[in-house]
Image (cartoon, rainbow, N blue to C red):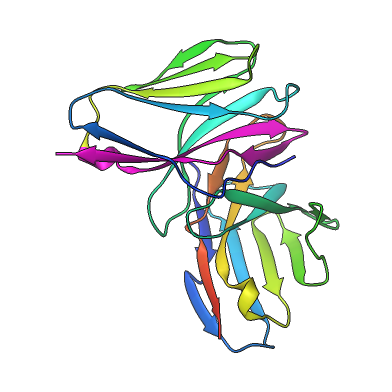
Amino acid sequence: GESVGLHLPTLSVQEGDNSIINCAYSNSASDYFIWYKQESGKGPQFIIDIRSNMDKRQGQRVTVLLNKTVKHLSLQIAATQPGDSAVYFCAENNFNKFYFGSGTKLNVKP
Amino acid sequence: GAVVSQHPSRVICKSGTSVKIECRSLDFQATTMFWYRQFPKQSLMLMATSNEGSKATYEQGVEKDKFLINHASLTLSTLTVTSAHPEDSSFYICSARVGTGNEKLFFGSGTQLSVL
């Protein structure tokens, strides 16, 4: 089922530092995961995805790690920039539907 | 990437009226579209799955008579909030999937509904 958060935790980082955003997903049968970025008043924007047969996937400045044993995803952003400030959600694919985690607000300080 | 257009971006209506939100896939055909609802500072909650040519499937707790979904073509799905009340005020977001199965979702820009 879906995971809904009542409060958004905030991660504050200095510009240029690396950021790590974590997500716990709910269903061990989920086989595909996506990280989305959402800016205020906008729809989610795709960042990176990973399938359950992988542990790690790298994109441009971003890396997703998947630990199926503990049902945990992380998103690593290298050299964080002010434009990275947003809310980040992980989404899990379960029975061809996507359910979203509770989200983390990333605040990048200049 | 694929483009999903959602309209209107913002709507204000009186209590008791109905509001229709459109979601279009502009450069691809979407057999399946999804409707989400989001309250401030909260996550996206899946409301329903819209299937072209068939009835939508609703998540548990979502009233199908309240939130009417029509997916008349491979590029258009509509969500109608019927007899809207202030508690229906929310950010509604549609998404569409390219292909079937395990493929990424692309999202519209969302509709902020305010019911007075």
- The percent coordinates of residue A43 (x first, y second) are 47, 53
Quadrant hosting residue A53: top right
Q: Residue furthest right?
A: B55
Question: In the picture shown, does residue B91 fall above or below A26?
Answer: below
Question: In the picture shown, does residue B34 fall above or below B18?
Answer: above
Quadrant hosting residue A94: top right
In the displayed structure image, the side of residue A20 where residue A33 appears, left or right: right
On the question of residue A30 being in view, the answer is yes
In the displayed structure image, the side of residue A48 where residue A11 appears, left or right: left
Q: Which quadrant does the C terminus of chain B fall into?
A: bottom right
Quadrant hosting residue A17: top left
Report the front residue among B12 and B34: B12
Q: Residue at x 47, y 27 (%)?
A: A22
A73 within the magenta span:
no
In the displayed structure image, the side of residue A5 where residue A27 appears, left or right: right
On the question of residue B34 being in view, the answer is no
Question: In the picture shown, does residue A106 fall above or below B78?
Answer: above
Report the front residue among A91 and B40: B40
Report the front residue among B19 and A74: A74
Q: Which residues are magenta?
A: A82-110
SS majority, magenta: strand
Q: What is the total number of numbered labels drawn onto the structure image? A: 0
A106 within the magenta span:
yes
In the displayed structure image, the side of residue A80 where residue A55 appears, left or right: right
Question: In the picture shown, does residue A51 fall above or below B75?
Answer: above
Q: Residue at x 72, y 59 (%)?
A: B73
- The percent coordinates of residue B8 (x first, y second) are 51, 72
Q: Residue at x 71, y 35 (%)?
A: B100
- The percent coordinates of residue B24 (x first, y second) are 58, 59
